[in-house]
Image: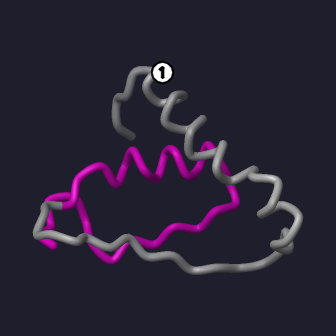
Amino acid sequence: MINVNKPTFHYIAHHVASNAGDVTCMATIPVDMEVEAHFLAKEDRVIAGIALADMVFSEVDPKLKVEWSRKDGDNV
């Protein structure tokens, strides 16, 4: 687990969650629907922040399953 101050963590989690509860999505997407998403790097970069992303995703939806194909420090 990483050390993140609570106000920063809650700020990030709030903004991620605020997009998840959008009325249009809730009205048109079945609750039990499974989806797959990918992060796309538009430029060469180094992966950083996976542990924080995992914490935020878990806070927003504890049932969310996230699988990473890269790790912090990997070049993409």
Name the outermost residue toward the front: 24
Q: Secondary structure at mark 1?
A: helix
The spot of residue 26 in percent (x, y) is: 83, 61
Residue 64 drawn in magenta: yes
Residue 19 highlighted magenta (yes or no)? no
Q: Which residue is mark 1?
A: 6
Q: Quadrant of the C terminus?
A: bottom left
Q: Main secondary structure of the magenta part?
A: loop
Q: Is residue 51 left or right of residue 63?
A: left
Q: Residue drawn at (34%, 54%), measured in percent from left and top?
A: 50
Residue drawn at (48%, 19%), measured in percent from left and top? 7
Q: Is residue 19 left or right of residue 43?
A: right
**Which stretch did the figure color magenta?**
47-76
Q: State the image coordinates of residue 46 (x, y, percent, origin top left).
A: 14, 61
Q: How many marks?
A: 1
Residue drawn at x 59%, y 68% as measured from the top left:
65
Image side of residue 27 versus residue 69, left or right: right
Q: Residue 19: x, y in percent? A: 64, 50
Residue 6 lies, with reference to residue 48, above or below; the image says above
